[in-house]
Image (cartoon, rainbow, N blue to C red):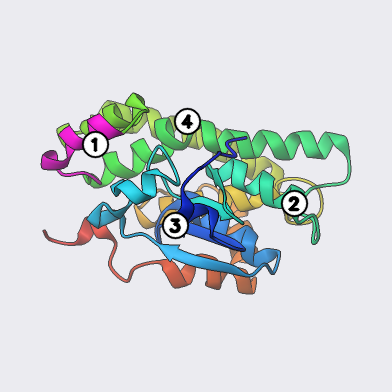
Amino acid sequence: MPILQTHSPEILKMQGLHLFHGGMSNCSMRARLLLDEKGLTWTSHPLDLGKQENLADWYFRINPKGLVPALVDNGVPVTESADILFYLEKKFPQPSFTPVSTQDQAAMNEWVDLASQLHMKAIKTYVYGSTGSATKKRSDMKRYAEIEPDKTLVAFHQKTLDGISKEEVAQAADLLEAVFARMETRLKDHDYLVGDRISLADIAWVPQYVVLSMVGFDFCPYPSIEAWNQRISERPTYKSAISDWLPKVPPWQVVR
């Protein structure tokens, strides 16, 4: 779990829960969703990813990869959205979003881990490839390559600028369709992905539905997934954590 050590006075003096996040970031959505579901008080620090605010020197002291979200809990930074979910669930166990049985707990962990594993090679590839958009400017890439320690991220953002091929988008779609077929099978006879109530598994995957729907991914073959999303969207936290943060016009539709 990436609980980081810091010597930064600015970070160490942060009392309470602070979330640094992006409005349309699916990873940020799940962190906001769990914070609100647990009824926790947290200070919001929205970053404008289009303006590259996440690449500022001060933010790299919070998250050395420059990714969102990042949680700071009384001066302790926690990065990676899946780890933020597990961190919050452990530190604030009530209300619980973990099933009772060990079998269901293992299944929940698998769903959360799968969301992380597919984040770049399926979800980000499909989103950026199908919209032809990029989060970086060519003029930013030299500095980004210098400050970003994860070179797979550098390579991915360079690829979004150069163009993700139709074949890569199709491969990403195949990966997603395989997962959604599995989800559809489960949700035909159950309200949630694991157990009989909402868990971290649902919180990890609902944002994927939101973002993929916005870029036109076809969920018509998965009516049970659509019904599942509808159930969760009726929870008050869906509005505060997801809907309220979505732009009226997606950034890839803005003429620059």
For this rendering, which residue is in front, 89 or 55? 55
Q: Are marks 3 and 1 in contact (CB under 8 Å)?
A: no
- Front position in the image: 178 or 63: 63
Task: Name the residue that disc number 2 marks.
Answer: 91
User: Which mark is in front, 3 or 2?
Assistant: 2
Mark positioned earlier in the residue sequence (2 or 4): 2
Residue 70 x %, y %: 49, 50
Residue 175, disc: 4
Tell us which disc is closer to us: 3 or 4. Answer: 3
Decide: marks 2, 4 in contact (CB < 8 A)? no
Give the labeled residue for mark 1: 144
Residue occupied by mark 3: 21
Q: CA distance from mark 2 to mark 1?
A: 34 Å
Q: Earlier in the sequence, mark 1 or mark 4?
A: 1
Q: Earlier in the sequence, mark 3 or mark 2?
A: 3
The part of the image, by quadrant, that contains residue 238 is: bottom right
Name the kind of residue labelled 4 in the image.
Answer: Leu
Q: Quadrant of the C terminus?
A: bottom left
Label 3 Cα crowd, 10 Å radius (few <14 / some 14-19 / many 20+): many
- 3D distance between C-alphas at marks 3 and 2: 20 Å
Q: Position of residue 249 (x, y in %)?
A: 28, 67
Q: Is residue 201 visible?
A: no
**Three-letter code for the amino acid on which mark 3 is drawn:** His
* Real-space Cα separation, disc 1 to disc 4, in angstroms: 29 Å
- At 28% from the left edge and 34% from the top edge, which residue is drawn? 147
Q: Is residue 125 above or below residue 234?
A: above
Residue 25 lies left or right of residue 161; in this view the side is: right
| For marks 3 and 1 on the same chain, the one whose residue lies earlier in the sequence | 3
